[in-house]
Image: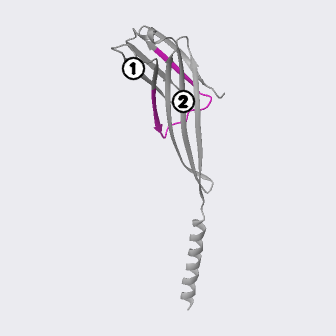
């Protein structure tokens, strides 16, 4: 009889422990980042549109995981007329932030038909661009070059 009572007591203790651990709470905090960085130079204006989602997961008030996903679009626009670009054969535009950088090279065997140029991309798991960031851009077209900064238009 003593053995049966001991077994029942142990089962009750184990059952109570399992209920206690199942009460662990899990929560998720999601932060959205949407920024527009703008700027210009003598011949060019640019806009860097940035969107990111950051997810923090917590278990019993302890951070257990972090994930992020972001995307951007960089648009350059020539301020002059399309005719002024008619002799352009090469165009290179680049950007740099504290987290990433990139460049695009375009060649024009024929005169360009537009004066707006775009590039974009995204990543997962990387660092998030801060709202106070300065985006440095450079545009090279044929033998000319201009560099300038883009700043968050909300600041």
Q: Quadrant of residue 34?
A: top right
Residue 65's place in the image compared with 152, above or below, is below
Q: Nearer the viewer, residue 62 or 136?
A: 136
The x, y position of residue 14, in whole percent, is 56, 74
The x, y position of residue 135, in whole percent, is 55, 24
Q: How many marks?
A: 2
Residue that badge 1 annotates: 105
What number is the disc on residue 49? 2
Residue 6's place in the image compared with 52, above or below, is below
Q: Residue furthest bottom?
A: 1
- Quadrant in the picture for the C terminus: top right
What number is the disc on residue 27? none
Q: Quadrant of residue 83?
A: top left
Q: Nearer the viewer, residue 105 or 13?
A: 105
Per the image, label 1 sits on a secondary structure element best described as: strand
Q: Bounds of the magenta span?
A: 119-139
Q: Which residue is at a point 55% across and 79% down the rendered structure image? A: 11
Q: Which residue is at a point 50% across and 18% down the rendered structure image? A: 77
The x, y position of residue 62, in whole percent, is 60, 53
- Does the magenta segment cover residue 131? yes
């Amino acid at each position: 009889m003593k053995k049966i009572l001991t077994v029942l007591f142990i089962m009750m203790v184990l059952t109570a422990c399992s209920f206690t651990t199942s009460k662990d709470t899990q929560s998720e905090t999601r932060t959205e980042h949407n920024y527009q960085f703008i700027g210009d130079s003598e011949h060019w204006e640019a806009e860097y549109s940035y969107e990111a989602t950051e997810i923090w997961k917590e278990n019993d008030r302890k951070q257990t995981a972090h994930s992020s996903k972001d995307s951007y679009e960089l648009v350059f626009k020539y301020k002059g007329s399309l005719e002024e670009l008619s002799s352009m054969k090469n165009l290179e535009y680049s950007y740099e932030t504290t987290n990433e950088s990139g460049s695009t090279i375009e060649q024009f065997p024929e005169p360009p038909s537009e004066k707006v140029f775009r590039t974009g991309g995204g990543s997962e798991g990387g660092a998030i661009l801060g709202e106070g960031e300065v985006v440095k851009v450079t545009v090279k077209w044929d033998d000319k070059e201009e560099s300038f900064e883009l700043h968050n238009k909300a600041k």
